Image: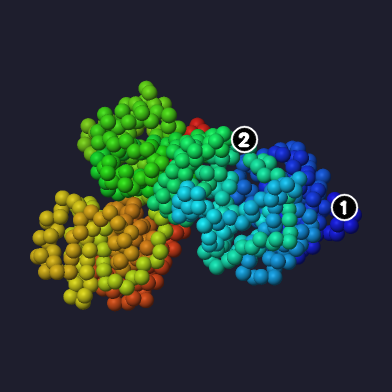
Amino acid sequence: MTPAGAGAPSPLDPLVVIVAYHAPDLLDRCLSGLEGAFEVRVVDNSSDAAVAEVTARHGAGYLASARNLGFAGGVNLGCAARGGRDVLLLNPDAAITPDSVRRLHALLTADPSLAAVAPTQHDPAGHNVARVLWPFPTPAGAWLEAAGLGRLRHGAGFLIGSVLLVADRALGDVGAFDDRFFLYAEETDWQRRAVDRGWRVAVCPEVAATHVGAGTGGDRTGRETHFQASHERYIRMHHGRVGWWSYRAAALLGFGARAVVLPGRRRHEAALRYRLFRRGPLRAEAELGRTGLRIAHVVITDNFAGVERYICQVADGLAERGHQVDVIGGAPERMRAELDRSVVHRPAATVAEGARALVGARGADLVHVHMTAAEACAFLTRPVVRSPVVATRHFAAERGSTSLRRALARLTSRHLVADIAISGFVARSVEGPTTLIPNGVATRPQAPLEEPVVVMLQRLDREKSPDVGLRAWARSGLGQRGWRLVVAGSGVLLPDLEDLVAELGCAASVTFVGHVEDTDGLLARSSILLAPARAEPFGLSVVEAMSHGLAVVAAGGGAHVETVGDAGVLFPPDDVSAAADALARLADDPDWRRAVGVALRRRQQDHYSIEQHLDRLEALYRSVTADERVSPAP
């Protein structure tokens, strides 16, 4: 119902989106202030009948989410089908008059460079004025705050999201709010992305709104944990792992000092925050029970190869999403260097060491094992560790390398609740049902593809067919035309391969660089990846090259048919002449080389991103921990 005199909502007016979570009295006050002058959508994250009743009484639209989506998820639901209208995001514990909304809207529409505007804010009694514009969180800013010099922070800032008018044109350009932010910092992240794309935000000082603050945010400890966890997520996303380490160190120093020198309640609050940062905000948030699981990844090796590198990438991604992750096994120094500080690492080169480590992590909600030794470890600890166990099939072969080991593997794999296949090729090659979850990698900037460099990035053993790659290189004649082949990787065949390039007369153009830690740097300085393995189970290095936009020449067997597909250049396995011809044609035609690289990079983004991989893993984890039966992939 529209009150008399308020006027019907205009299609030119902004849409009002309110994300509610219980607190119907606050929502009633919020809606009353709008006087029915605008179309309002209330997204109810609590599915509360009282919220529905208040919404209906004010004639607003009501959307009940199936679960608590968090603020960002609720905003995205409310903004869907907005019909080109600007959107006023309004907290239920805030209030603003229709005239104030229209004045805000006039400011937003008058300047096409503005992504968002906000009014000044104060509490309902008018005593306390809230700060509306804040500097973006940064590691440098955290150090200034720790030193008591926060007033020196300058540069672009963001508007708090309790009353925020967002331009439709900016939403279309920047995209939706990131729903990985459950509560807090979602508006910070969105505005950071907007500013990075050239947009501005502004405060409208002549317009005011009221805001209770923390009206629907739950208990104080939970709010503080969510607040700091969201800021950890933000810093990790925009400043990387090293940026987070710096930010966290500054917070520990600052809060630790305040916990010593400040009096009374302020001292108590500083001590609480110090303990929160010492534990890690994301890990503490996971312990609140909102989304986080405790997951143990087990690989019984003291090596660092493709499987261990994959585990590090996944563990870091899961930790960033708020899960507690323990990693058992892998080369200790390399694993610790690759893993985020919030991930617990326990060395385990033998099944016995792995069993002891897994018992130490027996609070895990789920155990994820990699390769048969890890499966045996999980089997041996079943009397103590009762968590469900899933396994990833990294190889297109039966479990176990000998008849005895295969027999033992059939026993130790009986308790597994799900088998994950990393590719369709693996799924077709192993016995029993599997869940297909292709590996994924982070998307990287497009490589220039200007350096005359071909790279082979793989282990140097027979199953990877490195001799085929070297023979194709020699036959291509690229070495005589100024191109170089960089062979990155180690393995038992290295001496034989060095002899082979001497025999082929191409030693001057081939460089064996051994194991490379900075694979991203190597790929960014290359133009073509050569992948000669005839039956690759997945080919992580191939997909990493695709993420950099390299042109890929790969043997048309195994998983290469899926990952590279028709976007790259496939040659019949072991066909040296075909591989050499593909290399020469790509080297001769830079436009075609770039077109192939761009198509492959797009294919990686569409099908093999780390985010898609983590989404699928999380879905499987939750189905398993909820005691749902996992079905094989179609």
Q: Is residue 219 left or right of residue 352?
A: right
The image shows residue 405 at horizontal and vertical percentages of 24, 33
User: Does residue 63 appear in this view?
Assistant: no
Instruction: Give the left or right position of residue 259, taking residue 553 as reference.
Output: right
Q: Position of residue 209 (x, y in %)?
A: 73, 53
Q: Which mark is residue 456?
A: none
The amino acid type of the residue labelled 1 equals Pro
Residue depicted at x 63% and y 66% = 114
User: Nearest the camera: 634 or 149?
Assistant: 149
What is the number of the mark on residue 3?
1
SS at mark 2 in the image: loop
Kindly give the residue lying farthest to the top in the view shown.
Answer: 383
Q: Residue at x 73, y 56 (%)?
A: 208
Looking at the rendered image, the disc whose residue lies closer to the viewer, 1 or 2, is 2
Q: Which residue is mark 2?
A: 219
Q: In front: 302, or 546?
A: 302
Instruction: Say which quarter of the image contains residue 53.
Output: top right
Residue 497 lies in quadrant: bottom left
Marked residue nearer the N-terminal end (1 or 2): 1
Left or right: 484 as drawn, with respect to 16? left
In the rendered image, the residue lying farthest to the right is 4
Dot 1 falls on a residue whose secondary structure is loop
Which kind of residue does numbered mark 2 sit on? Answer: Asp
The residue that appears at 51% across and 44% down in the rendered structure is 229
Disc 1 crowd, CA 10 A, few/some/many (<14, 14-19, 20+): few
Residue 154 visible in the current orientation = yes
Residue 172 picture location, percent across and down:
60, 64
Residue 221: percent from left, percent from top:
57, 36
